[in-house]
Amino acid sequence: MRDDLLDLRPLRTSAAYRDLWAGSAVGGLGFQVATVAVLLQVWELTHSPVWTGAIGLATAVPLLALGLVGGHLADVHDRRTIMRLASAGQVLSAVGLAAQALAGNRSVWVLLGLVSLGAACNALGSPARRTVPPRLLPADQVAAGLALQNLAFQVAMLVGPALAGLVVARWDLAAAYGVQVAAAVVALLGLVRLPPLPPVPTHPASDAGPAPAPAPVPAPVPAPVEVPGGGPADHGRPGRRRAAAGGWSIVWKRPTLRGSFATDVAATVLAMPVSLFPLVNEIRFDGDPRTLGLFLSAVAVGGIGAGLLSGAVTRALRSGALQLAAAATWGVALAGFGLAGPLWLALACLAVAGAADTVSVVTRGALVQLETPDEFRGRVSSVEHVVGVAGPEVGNFRGGVLASLTSAPVALVAGGLAASVAVGLVAWRNVPLRRYRTPAVTQSPVEAR
């Protein structure tokens, strides 16, 4: 029974991972506090939903524009250096937000510019950060490490907005931004004990993978020369101009990666529900803002619950099939939310959806990292990051358009069932993903050196 509980082995195995996890958890909490503070400040400055919507653009555009660039940098430079520079940039962005609040800034452009600066730093550093667990942990603990990171994210989503409300109500916006500054500094300090993480030399003729570990890891792309941009040794070649796009080619060449990303796109684009929450709340629960908050909290509670019981997920060998099952469950649960009448049933459906999302994210993340040779992990991780940003945004837009043409319940039910059917088609067509088994490796690449 204890194997089904939260798997804490990564925190015991690697001090560097433990520091990284703790710093990221605190940094994520500060980010959630700042997110609410920015929303409140933009509303105070403009009283316009168009401008509050522009916050999403200020965040998404840098992520989409620089995400693939960050992936290329992670494959040709020391990932520790990239993470430290990106974290330092996020500290500067947080300081800027606090300073403009203390100075009584009245320009929404200044505020959104600082938001974009933080998002740009995140875009450049996130692909490198995503590739770190496989370098610090044994392969059989990578999924557990990702589960711990996801749990920290879910807790931040649950606690951060409430903390922001308390801080702003008790003090002011500057105090909330001050919390983010402190959290960003802690996240930077979490990188102090991280070992150097230079690119691993490419071994085209070897089927054992790029890392010189004694136990085999998934084989690299069969012909690295064909991958646009190549690996770390490709400096100066013409293909380098296309290096940032190389991750897409790698994903397309490997059925397991292609199917895993297709599953995520189907789930988020066809069934993302957040844009419909206000309309559902208005139709069924008289627009009570407390109920709207409960919708968001229910998803986080489900995610946290799944995270606390993630030992069964991280030790599962059939992680491909598990991701497919979780994504299909996500769609069915959101269709149930669209049909639910009583509040308790609506919240229960959202909690199930949140739990399924956590299982899908953890299994996909581990599969992506373990199926990708190290010399390509930065670029493939940047694709994962871009898909993770764009999919939900497109899904929310799709849901809003469909609801305007029909109704919120119809949009939720149709979207949820369509997502489950699409995931079923992926499972039927993509046999390698359906049969994928997590490799059993007990020694990490860093320990093997």
Image: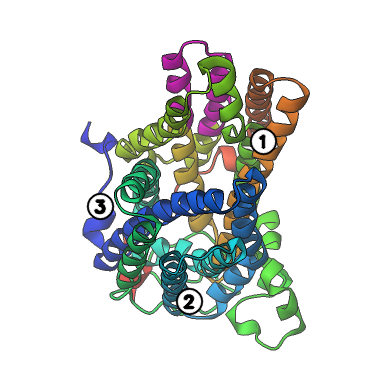
Residue 42 point in image, percent of width and height: 55, 53
Q: Which residues are magenta?
A: 325-353
Q: Is residue 361 magenta?
A: no
Q: Is residue 373 visible?
A: no
User: Quick check: marks 1 and 2 in contact, CB under 8 Å?
Assistant: no
Q: Amino acid under label 3?
A: Arg
Q: Is residue 206 visible?
A: yes
Q: Nearer the viewer, mark 1 or mark 2?
A: 2
Mark carried by residue 82:
2
Q: Amino acid under label 2?
A: Ile
Q: Quadrant of residue 66?
A: bottom right
- Work out whether 339 lies above or below 315: above
N-terminal-most mark, 1 or 3: 3
Q: Quadrant of the N terminus?
A: top left
Mark carried by residue 307:
none
| Side of 194 where 207 appears, left or right | right
Front in this rendered view, residue 208 or 161: 161
Display coloring: rainbow
* SS at mark 3 in the image: helix
Neighbours of disc 2 within 10 Å: few (<14), some (14-19), many (20+): many
Q: What residue is drawn where x is 25% and y is 37%?
A: 3
Q: What residue is drawn where x is 73% and y is 85%?
A: 237
Task: Return the residue at label 3.
Answer: 9
Q: What residue is drawn where x is 58% and y is 50%?
A: 388
Q: CA distance from mark 2 to mark 3?
A: 27 Å
Task: Return the residue at label 1.
Answer: 426
| Side of 114 where 250 appears, left or right | right
N-terminal-most mark, 1 or 2: 2
Q: Nearer the viewer, mark 2 or mark 3?
A: 2
Neighbours of disc 1 within 10 Å: few (<14), some (14-19), many (20+): many
Front in this rendered view, residue 305 or 122: 122
Q: How many marks?
A: 3
